[in-house]
Amino acid sequence: MATMVDVAQRAGVSIATVSHVLNDTRPVLPQTRQAVLDAIDELGYTPNTLARSLVTSRTRSIGLAVSAISNPYFTEILQGVEASVLKHGYSLLIADPHDDPQHERKIVQLLHERRVDGMIIAPSAAPAELLGYLGQHNVPTVFLDRLVDSPAESPFHFDQVCTENTEPMARLVTHLAELGHRRIALVAGLPGLSTTTERITGYRHGLAHAGLPYDERLVAHGNSQAEAAEEATHALLSLAAPPTALVTANNAMTIGALRALRERDLSVPDDLALCCFDDFSWADLFTPRLTAIAQPSKAIGAQAVQLLLERLASPDRPGRTVRLPSAFVHRTSCGCPESSKSTESPESPESHRKGPES
C-alpha cells in the first residue's frame, strides 16, 4: 500500500508539501499541487483519515441537518451540498430534524459528537435551543433557506444563505392582479419560519401595489406540508366569497392545493388561477403548466458549503448573509395563453452578497 513518503518521492516534493496539499493547511504552487495529485492518482494512495484527524483535530466531515429531505426543493439543495463537499475533499453526514426544535437540538448534538468540522442547518421555527447549543460549543455553522436572529449579546458568529422571497412573491400577486383577479388567496407556510414571514410580506406588498386591500380571511397556513395545505385550500374555497386566484408558498403545499381542487372538481385556471413559490422538475408536466418562482436550490447548497469553508478558515470573522435571486417562470396555470410564457434567468449570486444583518 502506498504511503505519503511514496507520494512525496514520486512528486519530487517533501512530505510536508504532500501534507499541505491533502489538508489545505498552507498555499502550494499550482504546478506543485498538481504534481502531488498526479502522484496520488498514479500510486492509488488513500489517506488515513482517522490518523489525520487525530493530528489536525479535523475530520474533514460536515454535518447537514435538513427537514423534509423527500421534498424536491431540499433534495436539490442536498445535491448541491454533496457535490460541493465532495469537490473539496469532505464527507457528509445527514440528519432530518423533522422541523421539531427538540429533535433538532438532539441530532445537532449527535452530529457534533461525531466530530464534524462544521454544520449546515435549515433551522426550525423555534431555534432557541439550537442556537444555544451551537453558541455554547462554538460550532462553525451555516444556516440555509431559513434565516435566524442571533441574540445581541452572543459572540457566536454564523453565516446564512437563502433566496429572495419578498419581491418574487409580490410579483406573483401583482401578475394575478394584472389579469383581473381581485380576491387572491395565499396558502402560507409554517408560522415562525423566516420564509413564511417574508412571503406573507411579499403577498401584502403585491396587493398594495395593485391597489387591493389585505383580507386576513384570504390567508390560510398550510404549515409547509401537503396535507395541511389541502385542508387550508378547502377552507379558503369554503368562504362565502371564495378566491378566484391562489398562490401557494412552497411546492409541497402546491400538491396539497391541487388535491383539494381535484376533490372539488375545479379546473385550473378556468375555475381558479394558480401560481406557486418553488418550481420543480415536473411542474411543466401538469395541465395546465404551473407558473412558479424557481429558487436556485443547488446553488444555495453549494454556497452554503463555500461559506462554511470560509468560516473554518477564518472562525472569528463577522457573520454574512447571502441571498440568491429567484426566477419568475411564466407558464399557463395563471390563466395566460401558452404563447406568452417566458422564463427569466437568475442574476449572479455575487451581486446579492451582503454583510451582517442588523
Image: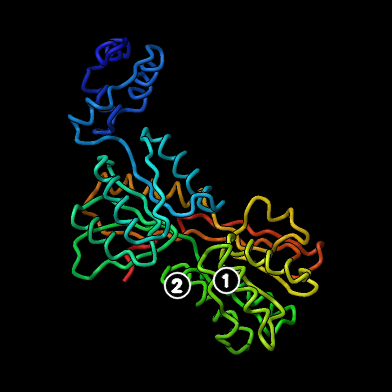
Residue 103 left/right relative to 274: left
Name the residue: 78% across, 64% down: 340
The amino acid type, in three-letter code, at marker 1 is Met
Name the residue: 54% across, 81% down: 204
Verify CB contact (< 8 Å) between mark 2 and mark 1: no
Q: Quadrant of the N terminus?
A: top left
Q: Is residue 100 above or below residue 26?
A: below
Measured as percent of width and height from the top left, residue 84 is found at 44, 40
- Among numbered discs 2 and 1, the one appearing first in the sequence: 1
Describe the element under mark 2 as helix, strand or loop.
Answer: loop
Measured as percent of width and height from the top left, residue 185 is found at 63, 78
Q: Is residue 153 above or below residue 43?
A: below
Residue 1 left/right relative to 266: left
Asked whether 319 or 134 is in front, the reply is 134
Q: Which mark is residue 169?
A: 1
Measured as percent of width and height from the top left, residue 350 is found at 45, 55
Q: CA distance from mark 2 to mark 1?
A: 17 Å
Q: Which mark is residue 191?
A: 2
The amino acid type, in three-letter code, at marker 2 is Pro
Q: Which is in the foreground here, disc 2 or disc 1?
A: 2
